[in-house]
Structure formats: structure tokens, C-alpha cells
Image (cartoon, helix red, strand yellow):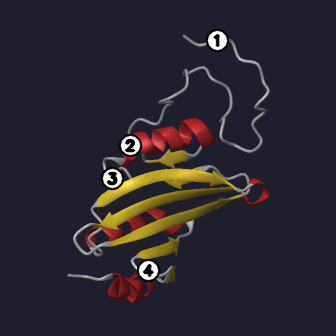
Amino acid sequence: MLTHTQARPLIQERLGISATGEGPLLVVEAPPDQWLALGRFAKAELGCGYLSFVSAVDWKEQGLEVVARVENLEAGFALMMKCKLGAGETRCASLVPVWRGANWMERECYDMFGVSFEGHPDLRRILLPHDWEGYPLLKSYAVDTPHPPYR
């Protein structure tokens, strides 16, 4: 069974990406063009069959960062996958082809942050009304904007 200490050099060797972090939580920052490849590798080679979450962080001037945590429950380690999109960028590959459970998580991320997941089978709003303007979890979103009551 693969351990987290064996996974770290394997990630570097196969993908050319360094894994950081201590103990059973490895952190890997992948460029957007390697995001899907990292997901496929994590599931197929590292045995990370459990997708815990997909979300995003708005770092203002630095842009958006997509974050996903996947786990190898048998070996007892997790991989925190990060992908910095850069200032003004909103496109990232979808992880739905790897983990079907990413579907609604990516839709929520789109709804709240405006991240467009390329290859997603049904990317549309999931929490807010379809005609909602803007993305409420962006730092640039005006929180004091009045909205009509939603029922």
C-alpha cells in the first residue's frame, strides 16, 4: 500500500510538481494546464478515491485559486490540490471526469466565485437564481447592493 512518504517523490517524478506539507497531508500546487492531469494521477496512481471538497479562494490582486482535497482512505493520507488561475482568469479544467462528486461542488464554486470549469457536463447556478448578477464570494462583490426578496 502506498504511503504519504512514497507519494511525495512520486508526484515530483511523474508530474514534475513538488509536494509540500507535513505528515499525512500533502499540498500540491499545479498550474492550470496540469490540474486535470494531477486529478487523474491522484486517483489512479495515489489511490485517492475520495473527493472531500472543491472550492475557491479570491486573493484579490493575485486572482482566484481553486482548491480540492482528495484522500486515500485506506493509506490514511490526503492531497490538497491547489491551482492558481492568475489575475482576471476564471477558467479551470473540471474534475468531474475523475470524480463524479465534483459536479455540484464545481457548480457551487461557479455560482459563488465565477470559476468556469471547462468540460463540466452542466455548469449552471446551483444556489442562486439563474438571473442573479455577480458572484457573492468575490472580494470585489458589493455586499451592500440591494436585492429584491427571493422566494
38 horizontally vs 146: left or right:
left
Residue at the spot 64% in from the left edge and 11% down from the top edge: 149
Give the labeled residue for mark 3: 97
How far apart in space, not on screen, are marks 1 and 4 (Cα)? Answer: 49 Å
151 horizontally vs 42: left or right:
right
Closer to the N terminus: mark 3 or mark 4? 4
The answer to whether any part of residue 101 appears in the image is yes
Q: Quadrant of residue 104?
A: top left
Closer to the N terminus: mark 3 or mark 1? 3
Q: Amino acid at mark 1?
A: Pro
Q: Amino acid at mark 4?
A: Leu
Residue at the spot 35% in from the left edge and 70% down from the top edge: 42
Helix, strand or loop for disc 2? helix
Q: Amino acid at mark 2?
A: Asn
Question: Against 7, is 137 above or below?
Answer: above
Give the labeled residue for mark 4: 15
Quarter of the image for the C terminus: give it. Answer: top right
- Residue 45 on image: x %, y %: 28, 75
- Residue 12 on image: x %, y %: 45, 86
How far apart in space, not on screen, are marks 2 and 4 (Cα)? Answer: 25 Å
Closer to the N terminus: mark 3 or mark 2? 3
| Residue density around tag 1, few if under 14, some if 14–19, many if 20 or more, within 10 Å | few
Q: Amino acid at mark 3?
A: Pro
Question: Against 51, is 119 above or below?
Answer: above
6 horizontally vs 56: left or right:
left
Residue at the spot 41% in from the left edge and 35% down from the top edge: 122
How far apart in space, not on screen, are marks 1 and 2 (Cα)? Answer: 28 Å
Q: How many marks?
A: 4
How far apart in space, not on screen, are marks 3 and 1 (Cα)? Answer: 37 Å
Residue at the spot 47% in from the left edge and 67% down from the top edge: 80
**Could you say which disc has been placed on residue 103 in the image?**
2
